[in-house]
Structure formats: structure tokens, C-alpha cells
Amino acid sequence: MPVPSEELPEFMTWDELELLPDEIAGQIELWGGRVVWVRRGPREHQKFTRRLTNEFERCARNDMSARPNRCWEVESETNVFLGTSGKSDFLTPDFLVHRCLPPFADVRSADTVLVGEVLSPSNTQTDLEAKKARYAGAGIPWYWEVGLRRDTSSIAHVRAYALETGHAELPQGVTPLRRANYLVVGEWTQTERAGITFDYPFRIDIPWSALAF
């Protein structure tokens, strides 16, 4: 029987989370042990998450074929545990790329090179910025954001963000609110017939036709 959200505590451990029914646990992220609910998006969210994951995996395989010394794994909706130990601080991106790991090993932020989110109407800007800040704080080099159109079942835009490696110049006496931040380094819409092309963390070349199956 599902557990009503109002009956759950504000904070939980990973071990406590594992005791919950899958349909409840799958909707929760733990941010330093704090319970954060992640709403399920509409079917378009699942559709484009799947298509993007498939395309990133194709590009990763092409890169590994050309560079046998590199090894990537591409996943969807997989927990990324922050820090070097413990499991009560994690995020669940819609799609991600990480370095190859032993079978059944946990994915840590240090192993993760790219995370992506497919935005749904239920996502608020506050939620998105908070999650993006946690990805940045964990040191994940690349963050991708995919916006969906509201009038048709299609993608409105795709943005690629890179993690700052230095600090911007600010007025004297002003300090950044967060120690790490992402900057937009690529943006694509379907008016660009060439599709999505980017060179990091490997060559990404995705035609719009592959996302509009």
C-alpha cells in the first residue's frame, strides 16, 4: 500500500528509504538526508528522456570505437550519489554519462561527467536552479537541459552548460553565493537543421529526426 507523503519524515537515511515501496521510493531524492519529492512528468517527459538516452549512448559507442582507451556508460533515471561515501545524499538525473564501473557499482558524482534534465510543466524555476546548483557543487563537468514545447509533442530547445573552472570578476566586497556554477556554452532549436552538435565529453551529433521519431 502506498505511503502518503504527509506520513514520511522530513529526513531519512538510505536504509530507511529502501524499506519504502518502490513506487514511493522512486519519487524521492535525498539531499543530505532531507526528503525531496520528484514529480513524475507527462508521457512526453519519458518519451524524450528515452530518445535522448539512446542518442547519447550511440554517440558514446562511436567515441569508444574510435578511442578504445576511453569507456563510457549512458543511463537514464539512475541515482548519482554525492561525495565519496554514504548513500543518503543523491540526485536522479533524467539521463547521464559516467565512466565505466564494475557491475552493480554505485554511480558517484566523481565518476559522472554529464547529467541531463528533461523539463516538464511541473518543474519550477526554483526547483531547477536548486538541483543544478547541487550538480555544480558536486563537480559534475557538464549539465544539459531539454525544454519541451507546450503545444506539441516536441523539443523546444536544448542547452548545454559547462562547469566554471575559475571565478568571475565581481565588484569589491561581493562574493559568489555558491562555490561552483554552470555557464551556457551551447543552445539548439529545431530551426537549426544541422541538429545538435557538441564536442564534449565526446563528439555528440544528434539529428532532430532521431528525437522526433
Image: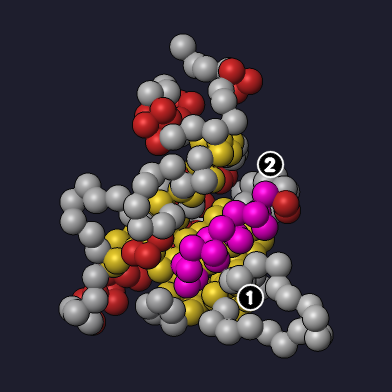
What scheme was used to colour the molecule?
Answer: secondary structure
Judge left or right: residue 27 versus residue 102.
right
In the rendered structure, which amino acid carries the disc numbered 1?
Answer: Val
Q: Residues within 10 Å of mark 1 (few under 14, many from 20)?
A: few
Q: Secondary structure at mark 2?
A: loop
The answer to whether residue 37 of the structure is visible from this angle is: yes
Q: Main secondary structure of the magenta part?
A: helix
Query: Residue 184's mark?
Result: 1
Magenta segment, which residues?
A: 127-142
Q: Residues within 10 Å of mark 2 (few under 14, many from 20)?
A: few
Q: Is residue 3 above or below residue 181?
A: above
Label 1: element kind: strand
Q: Position of residue 156 (x, y in %)?
A: 66, 61
Residue placed most toward the observer, 139 or 49: 139
Residue situated furthest top in the rendering: 1
Residue 186: x %, y % from top left: 59, 77
* Residue located beneath label 2 in the image: 122
Q: Amino acid at mark 2?
A: Ser
Is any atom of residue 57 visible in this view?
Answer: no
Q: Is residue 3 left or right of residue 187?
A: left
Spatial separation of the CA atoms under disc 2 and disc 1: 23 Å
Q: Is residue 21 left or right of residue 133?
A: left
Q: Quadrant of residue 54?
A: bottom left
Q: Return the residue nearer the eye: 188 or 170.
A: 170
Q: Does the segment drawn in magenta span residue 134?
A: yes
Of callouts 2 and 1, which one flags the residue occurring earlier in the amino acid sequence?
2
**How far across and down, in percent of the image, does residue 98 sit?**
34, 63
- Above or below 123: residue 54: below
Residue drawn at x 38%, y 23% is 19
